[in-house]
Every structure is written in C-alpha cells, then in structure tokens.
C-alpha cells in the first residue's frame, strides 16, 4: 500500500509552484518555475537516498537500484511542465505517483531485480517551445537536441539557453547519455476525456495512442456578383466546402470511434456581396486503427473528387501512425486493477503523450484515471483523490511485477 496522505500532500505542494489565482498552474517548460519544481522533487529524492541523473534534454531521472545494477530500469513517470493556464494534475499526477511508488518500495524494503527510475520528461506540453514531447522524442532517438537549440519562445528566449540554465540549476543530477532503452515504461495520467467519468470507471487501461492525419483542402470556384448570378451559373467555393463538411458528422456516427474536426476555414474574397471564389479549410482526422485512417482519407478524397461545381484539392499535411501499447503491459495493468478490485475498461488515448515515443524503444503502457467533466488544459482541472490513489496503487503493482523480485 502507498501512503496516500503523502501523495496528496505532495500534489498540493507541487501545485503551489506556479499557482494561478483560479486554482490552476502556469509552469512553462524550462522556466524558473519548472526549475523550482525539479529542485523540489530532487530534494525529496535525495532525502530518501535516491540517485539523480539527467541527460542532454534535461530529462530528470530518480533511481532506486535493483539487485542487478546492470539491468535496464523499469521507467515510470510523466512531466512537470504545464500549459499557460494549465491544471494541477496533467503530468504532475503521473510524476508524483511514480515517486510515491519509489518511496513505497523503499519504505517496505522491497528489493527488485531491475532498478526502478522515476522520470520527469522535458517539455511535454510544447506550449512555450514547439514541438511538444521534446524530451521523450529525443530519448527515443527520433530527434536530437541540436534540432531545437535555436527554437524561440514568444518572448524571444532561446530553447538552447533555457535548457543550459535548467541543467546548471540542478548540479546534483549526474549527466548520462540519452536514450539507453529501459526495460519497460509505464505512465499514469488523467484521462483528459469524458469516458471514464461517464461510465463510473476508476481505471482506464490504455491500449494505445490513436493516429492523426491532417489535411488542407483548397476549393477553387469562381467569384461572382451575389445579386446577379443565378444558381445554375454559380461556382460557389463555400457551398462546395459546406457539402463536404456536412458529411463529416455522419462519418463519425457510422464509425463510432473516428474524430473529425474542421478547425480552420478561410473564405475569399470574404465580401458580403461576392460569391466565394476560393475556400481553404483543414480537417483533423483521428483513429486508433490504421486501416480506418486509410478508409476515412479515401472517403474525403472521393467526396472532393465528386464535387462538380468547384475544383477541390486535398493535401495531407500530417501523418502520425497510431501506436499500440505492448500487450504484456496492457495485460499487467488490467490484472493489477482486477486484483485491487477496481472497475476498469480498455480505451485508446485521444491525446499524445510521452509514452507514444517510449513505445518505439521498449514495452510501454499507460494507466488513465478520470478527471472531472473530462476538463484538462484548464485551471479548473480536478480529480477525485480516491481515483489518484487507486491509479497509483495500480502503477505500484505493475512496477513491482515488471521490476521482478
Ligand atoms: Zn500531460
């Protein structure tokens, strides 16, 4: 059993670093507040005698040795940075729950075969420096720190400078090479969606992270006088765009799992009395199954080709393959929740997480717990303490199983 009072007190303490008046947090990646959160966690780790390591991306690792010092560690954790008007639990819960697991192993003198390490990934959110998930992406070998050194934030601060300052602020963390594959990676996170709360389920057993494809659609019609042009002479680009967009909700209904969104639409020339000659809009398409992403893309292209009053061209601007978490980890999370008598269901993650990148280099998985109203990336983000405790107990059980002994 974990010490739930200790976990909840730590969540309160961390929420004070960058606290906002509305009860949320603003802790931008690599900012002085992010450094303060890292120092605070490092101090707690050192008080327990755990070793601290860091790498070129300033990912922070807190290590408890196993019987086999040369074995790869079981890695558990999340992130400490937040959105500008972020909530208290996004990232914070997963990091502090992982630390609570490490302390529980220590409290109870439980020896493990593999070392267990808590990780706080650098810049998961991507709201200060783009893109997000930099720390885990570089750790997985999909990018290098050099790719981002010149990236600027909104005030002109360089990523490279802020990274150096963050590393310098934590001299007690020993540098080590980035990306040595762990034995396994498990992350606890709030769901950031409505499913678990609506179904009154405590534990989400995450099966993977859904894929995303983005499209830019250009509709070329013909601008003409709104008052004089009869219907049969019109090449109305917006009317054509509207016909395609109107078919997206029925597609979602038919599929059940697909998520299709038009978040941007530009009408030209944009004058009250001119029939639109050109419209440019976006479609964000998400699905956990690659075959369904293909089918939806084919459908969008077919709808565009079938339009007779205007010429539609569809360009794919982003293609992120879905990731399936390792069946062994998924089964371990499911079993741990069952053993603890917790309600559970399998579900894919709708949002991206650091675990997406880790899944490329080691068996990985995620545990979700409900958040109120599915609200996240919002100062009003909140959870039921018992759910946080339950999620941490599941994380502990899975960690013990994976670490062995
Ligand atoms: Zn997060």
Image: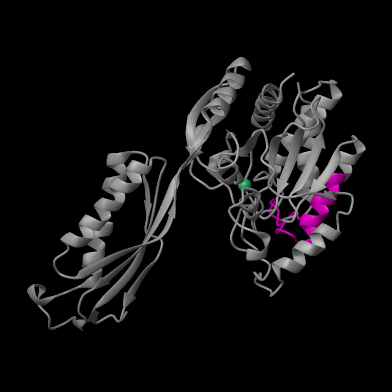
Image quarter (top left, top right, bottom left or bottom right) of the C terminus: top right
* Pick the front one: 234 or 145: 145
Q: Residue furthest front?
A: 70
Residue 262: % across, % down:
37, 59
**Residue 245 lies in quadrant:** bottom left
Residue 321: % across, % down:
44, 47
Q: Is residue 353 above or below residue 227?
A: above
Q: Is any atom of residue 241 visible in this view?
A: yes
Residue 396: % across, % down:
70, 26
Residue at the image point whose x is 77% and y is 36% from the top: 99
Residue at the image point whose x is 56% and y is 42% from the top: 360
Q: Which residues are magenta?
A: 18-42
Report whether 117 appears left or right of 130.
right
Residue at the image point whose x is 58% and y is 39% from the top: 372
* Pick the front one: 208 or 393: 208
Report whether 43 appears left or right of 342.
right
Q: Is any atom of residue 93 visible in this view?
A: no
């Amino acid at each position: 059993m974990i010490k739930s009072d200790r976990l909840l007190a730590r969540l309160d303490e961390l929420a004070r670093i960058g606290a906002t008046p509305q009860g949320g947090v603003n802790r931008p990646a690599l900012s002085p507040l992010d450094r303060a959160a890292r120092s605070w966690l490092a101090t707690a780790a050192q008080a327990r005698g755990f070793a601290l390591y860091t790498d070129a991306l300033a990912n922070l690792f807190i290590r408890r040795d196993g019987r086999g010092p040369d074995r790869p560690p079981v890695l558990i954790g999340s992130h400490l940075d937040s959105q500008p008007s972020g909530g208290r639990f996004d990232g914070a819960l997963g990091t502090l729950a992982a630390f609570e697991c490490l302390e529980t192993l220590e409290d109870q003198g439980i020896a493990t075969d593999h070392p267990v390490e808590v990780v706080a990934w650098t810049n998961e959110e991507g709201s200060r420096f783009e893109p997000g998930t930099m720390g885990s992406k570089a750790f997985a070998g999909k990018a290098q720190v050099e790719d981002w050194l010149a990236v600027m934030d909104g005030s002109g601060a360089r990523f490279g400078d802020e990274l150096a300052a963050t590393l310098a602020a934590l001299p007690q963390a020993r540098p080590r090479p980035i990306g040595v594959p762990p034995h396994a990676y498990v992350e606890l996170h709030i769901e950031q969606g409505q499913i678990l709360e609506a179904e009154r389920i405590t534990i989400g057993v995450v099966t993977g992270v859904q894929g995303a494809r983005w499209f830019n659609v250009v509709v070329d019609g013909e601008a003409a006088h709104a008052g004089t042009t009869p219907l049969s002479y019109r090449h109305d680009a917006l009317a054509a765009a509207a016909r395609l967009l109107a078919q997206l909700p029925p597609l979602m209904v038919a599929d059940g799992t697909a998520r299709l969104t038009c978040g941007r639409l530009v009408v030209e020339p944009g004058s009250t009395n001119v029939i639109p000659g050109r419209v440019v809009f976006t479609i964000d398409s998400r699905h956990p199954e690659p075959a369904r992403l293909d089918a939806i893309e084919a459908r969008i292209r077919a709808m565009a080709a079938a339009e007779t009053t205007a010429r539609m061209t569809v360009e794919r601007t982003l293609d992120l393959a879905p990731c399936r978490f390792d069946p062994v980890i998924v089964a371990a999370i499911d079993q741990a929740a069952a053993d603890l008598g917790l309600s559970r269901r399998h579900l894919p993650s709708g949002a991206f997480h650091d675990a997406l990148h880790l899944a490329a280099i080691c068996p990985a998985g995620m545990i979700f717990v409900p958040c109120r109203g599915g609200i996240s990336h919002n100062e009003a983000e909140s959870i039921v303490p018992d759910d946080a405790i339950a999620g941490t107990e599941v994380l502990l059980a899975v960690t013990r199983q994976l670490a062995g002994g």
